[in-house]
Amino acid sequence: MRTQEVFKAISDPTRRKVLKLLQGGSKSAGELAEAFDITKGSLSHHFNVLKAADLVRCERRGQQIVYSLNTTVFEDVAALLLDLFKVDKPNGEER
């Protein structure tokens, strides 16, 4: 997992919104662009950052590029955070 890229990707509100939109299922670049008031070039940059972090997958379907969440990376990030912030109970039992 590319930890640095993941945290860079989720640090930006636009990219977090893209991820949130993809929770409902795969969407084309055009469908995602409708939710934003930014240039296609700027949105393309955000897509590239998300792809570099492996948070989204994309595939070409004819003339369209369709994006979807890569859920395995989210599972890896969740496990990393749980391990990072693991707190032991006073009697030695783990939460």
Image (tube, rainbow, N blue to C red):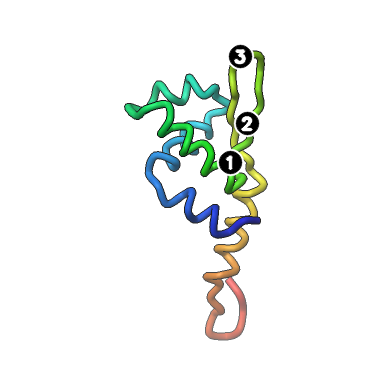
Q: In the rendered structure, are the residues bearing label 1 and label 2 in contact, judged by CB atoms less than 8 Å apart?
A: yes
* Residue indicated by mark 1: 51
Mark 3 lies on a secondary structure that is loop
Return the residue nearer the eye: 69 or 42: 42
Res 59 quadrant in image: top right
Q: Quadrant of the C terminus?
A: bottom right
The answer to whether residue 4 is above or below residue 56 is below
Q: Please, which residue is most extreme toward the bottom here? A: 91
Who's the residue at 58% across and 48% down the image? 53
Q: Image quadrant for the N terminus?
A: bottom right
Mark 2 falls on what kind of element?
Answer: strand
Tell me the kind of residue under disc 1.
Answer: Lys
- Which residue is label 3 attached to? 63
Q: Amino acid at mark 3?
A: Gln
Q: Residue at x 60, y 32 (%)?
A: 68
Residue at mark 2 to residue at mark 3: CA–CA distance? 13 Å
Which of the two labelled residues, at mark 1 and mark 2, occupies the earlier sequence position? 1
Q: Which residue is mark 2?
A: 58
Density class for disc 3 (Cα within 10 Å; few <14, some 14-19, many ≥20) is few
First in sequence, mark 2 or 3: give its number.
2
Look at the picture and state if 45 lies above or below 83.
above
Query: Could you tell me the amino acid type at mark 2?
Result: Cys
Question: Mark 1 falls on what kind of element?
Answer: helix
Q: Position of residue 23 (x, y in %)?
A: 53, 34
Q: Position of residue 75 (x, y in %)?
A: 63, 51
Kindly check if marks 1 and 3 are in contact, taking CB atoms under 8 A apart as contact.
Answer: no
> Which one is earlier in the sequence, the residue at label 1 or at label 3?
1
CA–CA distance between discs 1 and 2? 8 Å
